[in-house]
Amino acid sequence: MSRLKKKFLDEIVAAFMKDDAKLNRMEVPELKKIVISMGLKENERDKTSLELHTKELALLSGQKPIVTKAKKAISNFKLREGQIIGLKVTLRKKKMYDFFDRFCNIVCPRIRDFRGFNEKADGRGSYNIGLDDQQSFPEVNLDQVKSQQGMNIAFVTTAKKDVDCIKLLRKMGFPFK
C-alpha cells in the first residue's frame, strides 16, 4: 500500500469525520483519478517530437499515454479530422497515489519561482493546474529535451464542493499558497 493511501485511510478520513459529525465514511471525499495531458498541436511539423513527448510522459507517469485526435475539422484552427493534437494519461489507484506523492514532495519544490498553487478550483469538486515545462520532473533527462512542453494536470475528487476538494488536497499535502 502506498504511503499516501495509508495516510488517507488512517488520518484524513478520521479528520473529515471529526470536523463534520454528520458525515458518513462513504461521504468523505477522496482522490478518484489524476489526468495528465499535453497539447502537441505546435509540434505538428516535427514527427519525432510526438515520440519524444510520448516517452517523457510515459516516464513521469509510469504508463503509456494515449494519443488524442481531433474529432471534427475546424478550418480557423487549420485542424483536420483525425489529426493528432495531444497525449493524455489517466492514473488511478497505486500509480495515482505514487504520482501525487512525487508531485507534491519532489516536483513542486523544483518549479522555478514556486510559491504555492492558487486555491481556485473548477466549481465541480476537481482541481486543475497547468505547468509551463516538463523539466521540473526528475525523471526527464534534460539532455534529451529538445523543446519546452507544457502540460495540464487534473486532480479529480469525489467532492461535491470546491471547499471539500481544497480541504482534501491540503490534508494530503498539496502545496497551496
Image (tube, rainbow, N blue to C red):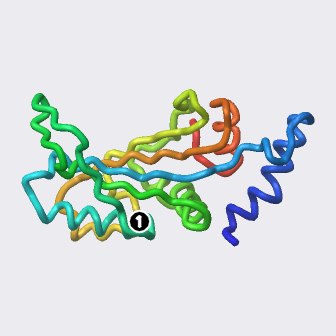
Element at badge 1?
A: helix
The one of 118 and 63 positioned closer to us in this rendering: 63
Residue furthest to the right = 21
Residue 129 position (above or below residue 147): above
The vertical placement of 37 against 2, above or below, is above
Specify whether 86 is left or right of 111. Answer: left
Query: Residue at coordinates 75% horizontally, 64% vertically from top-left?
Result: 6
Name the residue rendered at 56%, 27% in the picture.
Answer: 123
Bin the neighbour count of mark 1 within 10 Å (Cα to Cα): few under 14, some 14-19, many 20 and up.
some
The image quadrant of residue 64 is: bottom left
Horizontal side of 52 relative to 35 (left or right) equals: left
Residue lying farthest to the left in this orientation: 45
Left or right of 135 on screen, residue 104: right
Q: Which percent across, then down, holds residue 131?
A: 37, 46
Which residue occupies the foreground of this view, 41 or 107?
A: 41
Counting the numbered discs, the total is 1
Q: Quadrant of the N terminus?
A: bottom right
Query: In the shown orientation, is residue 30 left or right of residue 110?
Result: right
Picture layout, residue 76 above or below residue 165: above
- Residue under the image location 58 percent in, 39 percent down: 176
Query: Residue 89, how many percent across, how many down?
Result: 41, 58
Quadrant in which residue 163 is drawn: top right
Amino acid type at image mark 1: Leu
- Image position, residue 52 (x, y; %): 22, 66
The residue that mark 1 highlights is 60
Q: Quadrant of the C terminus?
A: top right
Rendered view: 50 above or below 155? below
- The spot of residue 67 in percent (x, y) is 29, 58
